[in-house]
Image: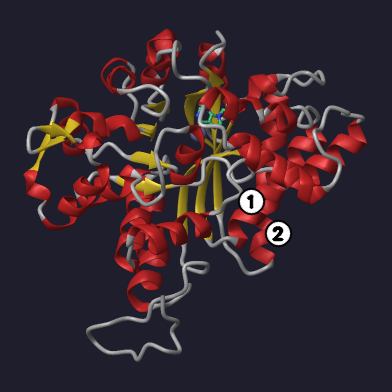
Amino acid sequence: MTTPETTPQTTTSSPELPVAVLPKVLLHDHLDGGVRPATVLELAREQGYDALPADEVLALEHWFSESADSGSLVRYLETFAHTVGVMQTADALHRVARECAVDLAADGVVYAEVRYAPEQHLEGGLTLDQVVDAVTAGFREGQEEAAAAGHRIRVRSLLTAMRHAARSREIAELAVRHRDREVAGFDIAGAEDGFPPTRHLAAFEYLRQENFHFTIHAGEAFGLPSIWEAIQWCGAERLGHGVRIVDDIRLDGAPITDDPAGALERARTDPAAFELGPLAAYVRDRRIPLEMCPSSNVQTGAAESIETHPVTLLKDLQFRVTLNTDNRLMSATSMTREATLLVERAGWTHRDLRRVAVNAMKSAFLPFDERLEIIEGVLKPAYDEGRLV
Ligand SMILES: O=c1[nH]cnc2c1ncn2[C@@H]1O[C@H](CO)[C@@H](O)[C@H]1O
Ligand SMILES: [Zn+2]
């Protein structure tokens, strides 16, 4: 990638800003999956939490990414015990949220939706509303701090209900109660296999009646039935991951999962050769946004490698693909890193990064006029003219 200094400005080519400073849009990031390792340690010390697997920053950082690199979503999720474990007071939640906004802004993120499950933060005696208030206040302070350092970011929260639990309706009501205070949507997360989204139909029906937004983690550790239920039974506006939608795409009569590398090559040169099954066609036709998280998927075994990750094929087949971090701590990643990996290992271009940023902004749970303002006023000047505003 070239810098503005080395690229002459002509009418046909615009300077390409480095990935690190390009404005990025993040729709899928877990608050408890992005805590700074040093903060986990400090909070543990302050609170007398003595279950941490390491007592030094680098060792702890390494432990999270190693343990999450397990090939299984269930084992990946076990690592969250130690972040959630130290996020049980209003002060801790406030701090983690503030640092999250600051870190994302420093990574060039201009708009982020950050999710967390309030029901997991009640062990210290907080109420659900107090949890949300603490996180919201932390995000606000973090945004101010980032702006003072020259990085403008807007952060919204999504409230997650855990799919193995039975509190989704209550969490949906909590989200709607806080809709005017930066809670922009709802989600369900946790182990997917055995916990279909239809277990939470009452929550989704309630949210639709309230004209509220929601996304659903689906098609990560379980395949097409999970995606189908999320969209056709529950009414999800977006899919968290959705990576398994490739199970419904064929090439020359064979599943593309038989030869992912071959399919990738063909998608670049001959996208019309692909046959979309009814669900994949519906997802593409309806422009249902896919919140894709490459590194996370490689760790949980939902994808084989960055090189062959379906995000590239789906982008080339013109699905509405977005690029996300999922869990910055567990995957030792950032938006800059995810984008750079795709550029270096999957042939992504500046144009592709522009595409996912605009796709994400179009798909955000933010009022239309605000989405437009960011696309026209922030993304286009940067991607098309090399101008940071
Ligand atoms: O990729 C994922 N798939 C499913 N669940 C997840 C993923 N990443 C995190 N969580 C779950 O969401 C909770 C709230 O943030 C986390 O505590 C974790 O259990
Ligand atoms: Zn997730």
* Front-lying residue, 182 or 7: 7
Q: Is residue 200 above or below residue 17?
A: above
| Quadrant in which the N terminus is drawn | bottom left
- In percent of width and height, residue 241 lies at 40, 35
Identify the mark at residue 145; answer none if there is no mark: 2
Reading the chain from its start, which is encountered first: label 2 or label 1?
1
- In percent of width and height, residue 123 lies at 78, 18
Q: Does residue 304 appear in this view? A: yes
Displayed quadrant of residue 276: top left
Label 2, secondary structure: give it: helix
Q: Is residue 180 left or right of residue 79?
A: left
Pointers 2 and 1 in contact (CB under 8 A)? Answer: yes
* Front-lying residue, 202 or 221: 221
Q: Is residue 294 left or right of residue 14?
A: right
* Front-lying residue, 190 or 204: 190
Displayed quadrant of residue 89: top right
Identify the mark at residue 101; answer none if there is no mark: 1
Q: Which amino acid, mark 1? A: Ala
Label 1, secondary structure: give it: helix
At 23% from the left and 44% from the top, the residue drawn is: 319
Q: CA distance from mark 2 to mark 1?
A: 9 Å
Q: Is residue 321 left or right of residue 110?
A: left
Query: How many C-alpha atoms fall within 10 Å of the one at disc 2: few (<14), some, or many (≥20)?
Result: some
Q: Is residue 325 above or below residue 229?
A: below
Q: Which amino acid, mark 2? A: Glu
Query: How many C-alpha atoms fall within 10 Å of the one at disc 1: few (<14), some, or many (≥20)?
Result: many
* Front-lying residue, 312 or 208: 312
- In percent of width and height, residue 296 lies at 50, 40
